[in-house]
């Protein structure tokens, strides 16, 4: 193989790889790339910041649902958010006898459809500073802006800040939040 041919082959391979990499724009969450071609579960299991959430989703039996077609918009609390709950809350929710309560809490973090931060910001603007969305659980979340931060408020008045927005998935979008929302 001539040097010229190898050089052309290398350029062709790099161009192909580069085109694929541009198509597959990832976002880093919890030390791992989140790939738009993977579903919510396939990505979430790789985030070191979401091990508690993944364990809770497994305990609630929601893996199959969140691996499904969707689309879903998930507000994903980080491990520190779960750690900020009163002592014993997470352990209590993970008990088999509390599966219904755990499912209610988790589905309260999901709204149907694929809603990115630009859409939420427009709805907030159109709503004179706030907007609401019904969750899969059935209750509503309230969205507002605090400066440039997107804030999600639960039915109890607890506020979570979106720390990483628009993590696109094959079956929806994830927005990382810093607090656990409670119905």
Image: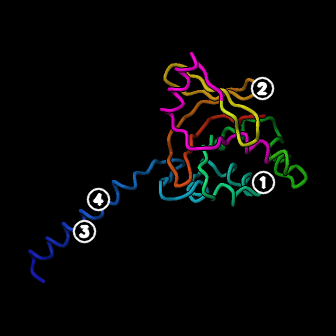
SS assignment at label 4: helix
Which of the two labelled residues, at mark 4 and mark 3, occupies the earlier sequence position?
Answer: 3
Question: Is residue 38 in the magenta section?
Answer: no
Point 40% across, 55% down: residue: 24
Q: Badges 4 and 3: C-beta atoms under 8 Å apart?
A: no
Which quadrant of the view contains residue 75? top right
The residue at which mark 3 appears reads as 13
Q: Is residue 102 above or below residue 153?
A: below
Alpha-carbon span between mark 1 and mark 4: 40 Å
Label at residue 166: none
The residue at which mark 2 appears reads as 156
Point 50% across, 48% down: residue: 168
Q: Is residue 73 above or below residue 124?
A: below
Q: Mark 4: few, some, or many residues within 10 Å (few <14, many ≥20)? A: few
The residue at which mark 4 appears reads as 18
Alpha-carbon span between mark 4 and mark 3: 8 Å
Which of the two labelled residues, at mark 1 and mark 3, occupies the earlier sequence position?
Answer: 3
Alpha-carbon span between mark 2 and mark 1: 22 Å
SS assignment at label 1: helix
Which span of residues is magenta-colored?
103-132
The residue at which mark 1 appears reads as 60
């Amino acid at each position: 193989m001539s040097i010229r041919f190898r050089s052309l082959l290398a350029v062709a391979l790099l161009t192909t790889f580069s085109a694929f990499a541009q198509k597959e724009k990832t976002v880093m969450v919890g030390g791992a790339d989140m790939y738009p071609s993977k579903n919510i579960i396939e990505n979430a299991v790789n985030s070191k910041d979401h091990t508690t959430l993944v364990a809770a989703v497994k305990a609630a039996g929601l893996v199959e649902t969140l691996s499904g077609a969707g689309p879903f918009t998930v507000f994903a609390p980080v491990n520190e958010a779960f750690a900020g709950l009163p002592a014993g809350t997470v352990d209590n929710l993970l008990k088999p006898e509390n599966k219904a309560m755990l499912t209610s809490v988790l589905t309260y973090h999901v709204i149907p459809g694929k809603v990115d931060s630009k859409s939420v910001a427009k709805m907030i603007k159109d709503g004179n500073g706030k907007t609401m969305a019904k969750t899969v659980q059935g209750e509503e979340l309230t969205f507002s802006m605090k400066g440039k931060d997107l804030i999600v408020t639960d039915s109890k008045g607890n506020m979570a800040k979106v720390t990483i927005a628009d993590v696109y998935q094959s079956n929806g979008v994830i927005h990382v939040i810093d607090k656990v929302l409670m119905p």
